Image: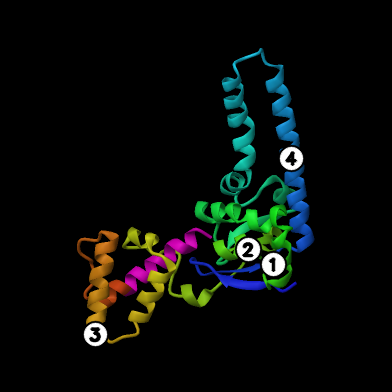
Amino acid sequence: MAESDIITGQYVQISQTPASIGERIGAQLIDWIVLLGYGYTVTWFISMLPSTAGGATFLIELLLVVLPILFYCPLCEQLNHGQTLGKQLLRLRVVRKDGSPATLGCSLLRWLLFIADGPLLSFVGVLVILLTPHRQRLGDLAAGTLVIRIDSYNKIQVSLDEFSHLSRDYHPVYPQAADLSLEQVNLISKTLLLDDDDPRVHALAAKVQQVLGISQHKESDDHAFLWRLQRDYQFYALEEI
């Protein structure tokens, strides 16, 4: 199975191996067994309670049985770092294609499309997993996610070229730089290739100040400001590693 290398927003290279079809099915079977055991146990306890009105019993079963089972997958993925109990036992994890944690929207989209991927439509997802290079089912393709082996989810290389200018006693000037996205930093990097007096440099500097809430920068010119902002971003990115 082919591995893929990605570069995260913190300039960290990650090597990841998609989970095999067998591993994914195994994790799903474990989850179904867990849910079946949970549903049976809780239902049995509810049946042992003193008799109540039918409406109250239905509400209790809805809150304690139906909803937890229904939202088991997206809740686990959000609260347990992309893992259901089955994935945790088999050392798998759901991540976005860039290696970052799956968002709530991603988890919900994967969950919604399990209707198409799962048994209701004869396990179409199994066929799609076998045909896609990164072993993605329909829900993964729509949400931009992968199910990967945790053993392969290791930060293996920091691009030292990107950080060669930073020393241990480097002091960032703009803490707001930590809020920049990778796309914004890439745009700043491309703009820094322009001449200092290029109008696009001044326009971007003004826009960045507005977005980050920097009233007035401390550098000699806009080009120097953008350069410093890029370095500060990289400093904070290193601290997260």
Q: Which of marks 2 and 3 precedes in the sequence? A: 2
Tell us which disc is closer to us: 1 or 3. Answer: 1
- Asked whether residue 225 is drawn in magenta, I would say no
SS under mark 3: loop
Q: Nearer the viewer, residue 186 or 177?
A: 186
Q: Which of marks 3 and 1 precedes in the sequence? A: 1
Residue indicated by mark 4: 34
Q: Does 30 appear above or below 24?
A: above
Q: Does 61 appear above or below 212?
A: above
What is the magenta range? 227-241
Tell me which amino acid carries mark 3. Asp
Q: Is residue 43 left or right of residue 166?
A: right
Tell me which amino acid carries mark 2. Leu
List x then y, in percent, for residue 147. 66, 60
Determine which of the numbered discs, if any, sits on residue 202 in the image: none
Question: Are dots 1 and 2 in contact, CB under 8 Å?
Answer: yes
List x then y, in percent, for residue 115. 64, 53
For the N terminus, give its image quadrant.
bottom right
Residue indicated by mark 3: 198
Tell me which amino acid carries mark 1. Val
Residue at figure coordinates x 34%, y 68% from the top left: 229
Q: Is residue 166 left or right of residue 62?
A: left
Q: Which of marks 4 and 3 precedes in the sequence? A: 4
Q: Is residue 54 visible?
A: yes
SS under mark 2: helix
List x then y, in percent, for residue 32. 74, 44
Secondary structure that dominates the magenta span: helix
Residue indicated by mark 1: 128
Residue indicated by mark 2: 138
